[in-house]
Amino acid sequence: MTTRFSQYREAFLRLIYPVVCPLCGTLPGFESRSLCGKCHVRLESHAIAPDDAHQTFRKGPLAEAFSIFHYRAEVQTLLTRVKFASEIAFLEAFREYGANFLLAHGLKTRYDYLVPVPLSLSRLLMRRFNQAEVLAQMFSSETGLSVRADLKKIWQTPSQSRLTREERGLNLQGCFKTKKAPVPGAAILLVDDIFTTGATAREAAKVLRAAGAAKVGVLTLAKTPEIITARAGKAAH
């Protein structure tokens, strides 16, 4: 009875607020409020193999990094529309994948809480939301891991897209500060949308470790191939 009532309620809501798949424009089935079945399959095809979804770092403040998808095709389309067209609802397509990933990799027991990588105030005012915070809250509701805003970004750094690995690190130096002290000795899992060289996560981890965190890792929705286009006159690598 409850299932049938839910289906009737969903059908009624869609009469008033039509919902279409953000990737192909068709109407998803009643079991989904995000992607249609075919697009779910296409999205799943970009999931990173379990053995490649985790990397550890022997040096530096960042202990490890986890990424759920390769940053390509449907994943790139969804995240681009979220960040540059303010289509925040499209993040819902990643809810189940993120929750399953957290549980499959034991992150709920390995970490004490989640910390979204913050945006600068100017970027937050322009976008009206922080996609990393939305993702962290989404994953929290599915796993029970709490979310804390331990970090703040004190200025907007220039775009990283055309910088080398070394330049990215220099570009971010000093841009994060603690908003409130992390729980002493805590294992903190940063949450962000995209991992490229890890410069952002390392800078955030450095601040958290200096403030008393025992361990910092990062979970991102997607990971890009590490091909960074340098400024004119430098070779891409």
Image: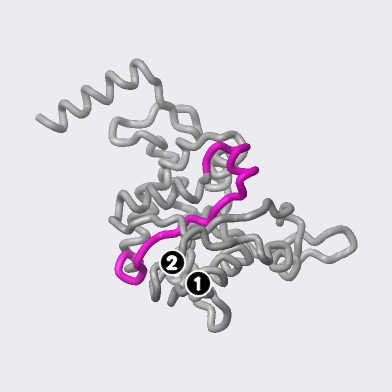
Q: Amino acid at mark 2?
A: Pro
Q: Position of residue 72 (x, y in %)?
A: 58, 51
Horizontal side, residue 40 vs residue 141: left or right: right
Q: Residue furthest top?
A: 16
Q: Is residue 171 above or below residue 38?
A: below
Q: Residue at x 53, y 62 (%)?
A: 178
Which callout, 1 or 2, points at the residue further toward the start of the chain?
2
Question: Which mark, residue 182?
Answer: 2
Q: Secondary structure at mark 2?
A: loop
Residue shown at 63%/66% (left/top)? 199
Does residue 124 belong to the magenta stretch?
A: yes
Q: Badge 1 is on which residue?
A: 211
Determine the CA span between mark 1 and mark 2: 7 Å
| Residue 49 in sight here | no
Of residues 149 and 161, the one drawn nearer to the viewer in this rendering: 149
- Residue type pointed to by label 1: Ala
Q: Residue at x 61, y 45 (%)?
A: 121
103 in the magenta segment = no
Q: Quadrant of the C terminus?
A: bottom right
Q: Which residues are magenta?
A: 108-129
Q: Quick one: label 2, few (<14), some, or many (20+) residues within 10 Å?
A: many
User: Relative to the observer, which residue lies in front, 127 or 86?
Assistant: 127
Residue 109 percent across, percent down from the top left: 30, 69
Query: Percent from the top left, x then y, of residue 223?
Result: 56, 60
Who's the residue at 39% across and 76% down the image?
Answer: 185
Query: On the rendered image, what quadrant is the N terminus found in?
Result: top left
Q: Are marks 1 and 2 in contact (CB under 8 Å)?
A: yes
Q: Quadrant of residue 167?
A: bottom right
